[in-house]
Every structure is written in C-alpha cells, then in structure tokens.
Image (cartoon, grey):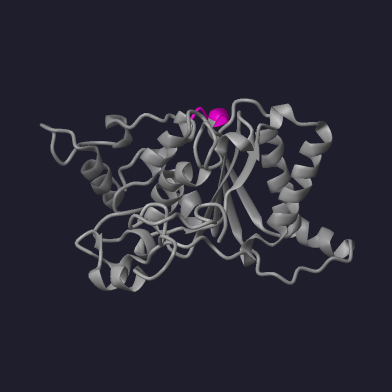
Amino acid sequence: MAKNLIQSFESGRVYSKQQKNVLIVYAHHEPKSFNGALLRKAVETLEADGHSVEVSDLYAMHFDPVCGRTDIVGSLREEGFFKYQMETKSAWENGTLSDDIKVEMEKLKRADLVIFQFPLYWFTVPAILKGWIDRVYVMGFAYGMGKLYSDGPLKGKRGMLSFTTGGPGAAYCDAGMNGDMNVLLWPLQNGMLRFVGFDVLAPQIYYAPAHVSDDDRKQWLDDWGKRLNNIFEEPSLKFVDFSNFTNTKLSDKYVEGESSKQYAPTIGQNLGKLFSPTGMLKP
C-alpha cells in the first residue's frame, strides 16, 4: 500500500477515501480466462485506489474442498461419532483447526469487502469454492448461537459475487430457459453471504463472455474498474432484518405491514406475491 501511496502523490492523485482491506476468493483453473482478467482488473484497480488486496486463488493453492477429520488437529470431542459442525466449532475455540482453514479465516477477518470471482457451474459455484465455504465458515466463527443474517458474525463486512455464465443473458430472464437470475441468486446471496452477516452488494454478471467481441470484453473490464472505484459507497441489496422473525418465521406484525404492498419483501420471503422488479440484482 505504501508503494501505491507514493505513486499516487507522484501522479498528483491524492486519496480522499478511507482505505480498506479486500479479499478476492478466486475459483478458475486458467489465468488467461476472462475470470482471470476480471481478477487482475480488480487487484489493479483496488490497489491503485490504495486498498489492500489479498487473493485466495483456490486452484493455484490446491485448496482441499473436502470437509473431514483432518480439519481438526489432535483429538476430537467425541471419538465415537464424528459430527463435523461441532468438532470444527470446538477446534476453532481451542485453536486446533488445520492451518489451511486458519489462514483463510484470518483473511476473512481482515476483509472489509469479499469478492467471490468464479464461472457459474451447474447454476452454482464451482465445487472448490463451495468447499471453501464449507470449511472456512466454521460454526461459532461465521454463524451459530443465534447469530444469523443481519446479526451474523460477519456483519459490517461487504460481500459480492462476480461471475461469468456460459449462456446468454436472455436465457436467465423470467421467460428464459434457465430461469430468472433473481431466483438462481437467492440461495447464493441469501445463503452464502447474508446468512453469515454480509451486507450484500449487487452481483457483477458477465453473460457468455466467450461469445462476445474483444471490444465488448474490454468495455466490460473498464466498467468493472469504474464500479470498483466506488464500491464502498454502493448501497447494499435489501433483505428482511433478522429481528422480524419469530420462531424462524416472519412475525404476524411484519406480514400484516406487508399486506397492502404490491411486491414481496424478498425472493425467498415472497408471501405469495410478485417478486420485486429488482430482487437479487439491484438495491
């Protein structure tokens, strides 16, 4: 960051924004891919703005996505029956998690913003990225004990998805053969991000980059850089606050307050209504 700061003064550019820590969790095999270009653009742009950027390049790291007994160093709480959630929670409390999990946890703790960069595989994240979530989001550290959603342990941090698709945008509309992108994103943005407390930013989606021109891809990269220049000033997506649920369901008072509204509160809590026109794509 010091090098970037010196360069900023030499170029006549003085930072007026508070500097932040950014973690990019990157899941793609090929550095020359468009996902790789998006990663490099993000690092270049954020560092030029003086932010500190860490990258977890999961394939390059040979990150093990499989949860198992080796995630705990030493003895277990219960040797006779292996319950992964409780064993890793205990290991986190006792400092006996495997080193690869500890390293990723520390990155996550430092981060003000986490960007997940990946190609969409089978309507979700690649297995190696799902494995990162499975292993790093340890009970007690990222969720649990009544700490969920807007009260989750990672509250105050920003999180977002940046990804590519194989199919064109038309395939992901409300009449498209792959279905409405809003619906596809609900389990990812609500389940993978909001569940642990993130303020979720609108996703950055690139539809079928392999089938557009070089000029289009260059424009997409420029637009991504411009968005990142102001990423910490963006409003987040709307979710129902955790306080509005009673015994895991929306309270009668909240439901009554929504009764006269045309659109559902969210994609998930739709109350049998039309989805919001922005849903999981815009604040």
Q: Which quadrant of the figure has residue 168? A: top right
Name the main secondary structure of what is drawn in magenta. Answer: helix
Q: Is residue 130 left or right of residue 85?
A: right
Residue lying at 36% horizontally and 69% vertically, measured from the top left: 258
Measuring from the top left, give residue 172's x and y in whole percent.
56, 38
Vertical placement of residue 112 versus 218, above or below: below
Residue placed furthest toward the right: 11
Question: Is 128 on the left or on the right of 141, as rendered?
Answer: right
Q: Nearer the viewer, residue 152 or 63?
A: 152
Whether residue 95 can be seen here: yes
Q: Quadrant of the C terminus?
A: bottom right
Residue drawn at x 71%, y 49% as measured from the top left: 224
Q: Which residues are magenta?
A: 59-63
* Residue 49 vs residue 282, the one in the foreground: 282
Residue 121 drawn at (x, y percent): 51, 29
Quadrant of the image occupied by residue 52 = bottom right
Q: Position of residue 196 (x, y in %)?
A: 38, 55
Residue 83 in magenta?
Answer: no
Horizontal side of residue 57 vs 187, given as left or right? right
Q: Nearer the viewer, residue 103 or 219?
A: 219
**Can I make out residue 32 in this image?**
no
Residue 257 in the image: above or below residue 183? below
Q: What residue is drawn where x is 27% and y is 50%?
A: 94
The residue drawn where x is 23% and y is 59% is: 248
User: Which of the pair 200/46 is nearer the observer?
Assistant: 200
Tell which residue pokes out farthest to the left in this image.
Answer: 80
140 vs 127: above or below: below
Q: Where is 203 relative to 256, above or below?
A: above
Q: Position of residue 87 (x, y in %)?
A: 22, 41
Residue 60 drawn in magenta: yes
